[in-house]
Amino acid sequence: MGHAISPHETEQLKAAIRAWGRELGFDAIGFAGIELGAAEARLADWLAKGYHGDMDYMARHGGKRARPAELLPGTRTVITARLDYLPAGHAADAILRDAERAYVSRYALGRDYHKVMRNRLQKLAERIAVETGAFDYRVFTDSAPVMEVDLAAQSGLGWRGKHTLLIDRHAGSWFFLGEIYCDLDLAPDPPKANHCGTCQACLDICPTQAIVAPHEVDARRCISYLTIELPGSIPIELRPLMGNRIYGCDDCQLACPWNRFARATREADFAPRNGLDTATLVALFGWTEAEFDARLAGSPIRRIGHERWLRNIAVALGNGPVATAALAALQTRRDHPSALVREHVAWALDRLKPGTAL
């Protein structure tokens, strides 16, 4: 049973929820229904092509992703939220051009967004309950089988870009999304028109050509997948294409014309920590496992573990210039206990041999 609310009360409550969201620091709030039939068909096709790679959880929860009422019985409305994360003066292009520095996806430079978003969404739900009385709800932020981009698009927070991320005309795409599934019966907001037009900047810029068609990404080629989700060896043919990107990749967003309008975040939690926005590859490669765990406590990066961290940086060092510091750093990990690390270090050292074409 859902909460029955009159049309007039619905609009009043929606306006109030938007205001409470702003007070909590959200940059936009939207309201979506729970019909995701078209998105479910697209997901099934994507899975059938094997584009999810080793992300088995995508297949395990495929049906639930497109059926909110199966995830939370009684769901009538999904309240969507946007929180901008782009740090001020982020200098992404300059870092990508400096092969001795490490490029970390802009979303991961600060505190783990899961905690920030989840806490804010919980507070928003509690504030709504003060107004409506107890209601059934559950908050999500990239933490369960939720089709957040499709729900956000249906709620009018933007449109799905050709790189598959959500885009807003006034904010670009540098933002996190979160949801509150609930049994409140709130009218959905109208969706926004798609404004990508004939632009293919994101497809053209992708270093590994992972965006195989508009709105379709082969995760197995995506640098974000390779550096974060892939547990094993990075395919040899893709390593030279990764450049100095050690955690995630933002190229498709950097190329998007709509991101000219993106605003710097107001969230202090998303400001760069541990010098990750300027650090050299050699410096980060030198971190011990204890240093990795301590310095990246509260960071989304910590979940990949020290082994993958070294794997990723070894590849980046192998893509950089032949330098004494880089060679010396790689030598220190040549006999690392992990076969995964040793393999990627050996590849990098081979790449840096005198006379090897880079």
Image (spheres, grey):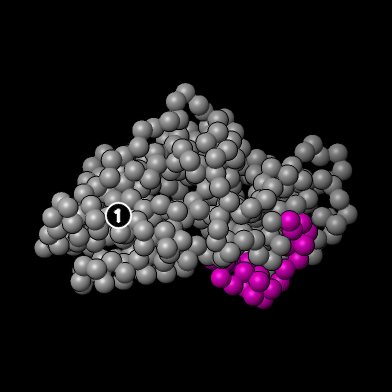
> Which residue is more in the foreground, 240 or 300?
300
Tell me which segment is drawn in magenta. Answer: 278-306
Front in this rendered view, residue 251 or 191: 191
Return the residue nearer the eye: 277 or 77. Answer: 77
Q: In the rendered image of this protein, does residue 119 appear above or below residue 225?
A: below
How far from the left and from the top, in percent, is residue 125?
31, 67
Circle 1 Cα neighbour tier, 10 Å, few/some/many (<14 / 14–19 / ≥20): few
* Number of numbered discs: 1
Could one spot residue 263 in this view of the protein?
A: yes
Residue matched to label 1: 15
For the C terminus, give its image quadrant. top right
Amino acid of disc 1: Ala
In the picture, the quarter occupied by the N terminus is: bottom left
- Identify the secondary structure beneath mark 1: helix
Q: Nearer the viewer, residue 277 or 216?
A: 277
Prevailing SS of the magenta stretch: helix
> On the image, which quarter does residue 254 sit in?
top right
65 versus 191 height, above or below = below
The residue that appears at 73% across and 44% down in the rendered structure is 94
